[in-house]
Image: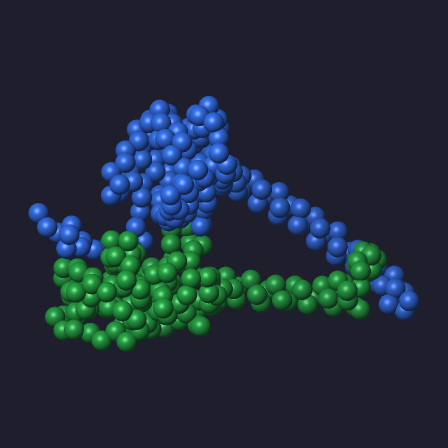
Amino acid sequence: MSAHVAGSVRTGGIRRYVFPALAMVIVVVLAANRLFRDERQIDRAFQAALTLGSKTEMESAIVSAARAAELTTLFSTNLTFRLGSSGMTVRNRSDLQTLAYRARTYADTIRVKSLGHSIEIGTHRSEARMDASIEAVVQTQEHVDREVGEFRILWKKEDGTWRIWHVEAIETIRRPRLWDEWAP
Amino acid sequence: MFQTFMNRWPRWIAGRDPRRTAVRILLLAAICIPLFRFTLRPTIIHGISMEPTYRDGSLHMANLMQFRRRDPRRGEVVVIRMAGGASLYLKRVVGLPGERVRFQHGHLYINGAAQPEPYLADKGAWLMPELTLGLDEYFIAGDNRMIPMQQHSLGVVRREQIAGGLLF
């Protein structure tokens, strides 16, 4: 009871600070919202790519094809993949769609998730660079494969939409050449 | 108004004195956010590359300040930031800047001399031709040498990529 009375007495004093503080918080939130709008859009597109790259249950060939096609909409029409030692090359949406479709029909489940990513927006806010660590767990009837890869992903704003136009594998730990790779 | 607002919360959340509780929460956040973002990082091990020293799934604390004032030494466990910055590699330093590193039938050779590696359970059979590290480079590897070298994340990192060590 006494605490309540004490609170009531001070209410006027607090109000003097609460409303300006609240207004300041709103201004900061709105400014941050505007300032980081591109980052959020890229982040959403990236999460969508990870979701569309995943497969949680058995699906028909038609669904696999539809998901693979949907995935390509997140990419620019002129895209390049450089995936290091795997020698995999993807030069357009059609290549990517084929690759995604094959992966979906091969695996029972695919779980793709980000282990962390950073986004750097270019000075003109029309290009962006993302460094990401991505984990993929692919399960087939015979085995489960877990792979972690590090990638540099370049984004481009096309008609107001952020799309991926370049993906390349990067190595934080530079692998040495081993004896079996050394041999002619 | 603040008091009235806080009085609506159950007492087990807001405490006996809601204002003091709010201050405590803010103070705790002001301490914990920088502490766990820039200094100590709770870390769960994924994978078996550091076994038997560090088990898959075990919880540890990375100390991101460990190598602010000095450079890592051979045999020390370090954490390296992966792309994106949120995840870390956990590896052991086996080669220091400027050294020549080689693996032959599981034995580590530095500048041509075999090095003891007491932290290993099994030396394995790794083979790697000699490479010379740059003046800013370290050679790092995991403790589980039973994993074939081709499937193991090992190699050269620059000093700036080493984010810290392990507290425990």
Horizontal arrangement in the rendering, residue B41 relative to residue B72 (left or right) = right
**Front residue (pair A7, B102):** B102
Q: Quarter of the image holding residue A15?
A: bottom right
Residue A172, percent from left and from top: 32, 53
Residue B117, percent from left and from top: 25, 73
Q: Quadrant of the N terminus of chain A?
A: bottom right
Is B130 placed above or below A121 here?
below
Q: Quarter of the image holding residue B16?
A: bottom right
Residue depicted at 47% across the width and 27% down the height: A60
On the question of residue A121 being in view, the answer is no
Chain A colour is blue
Residue depicted at 23% across the width and 65% down the height: B124
**Front residue (pair A106, A82):** A106
**Front residue (pair A108, B61):** A108
Is B11 placed above or below A20 here?
below
Residue depicted at 68% across the width and 68% down the height: B24
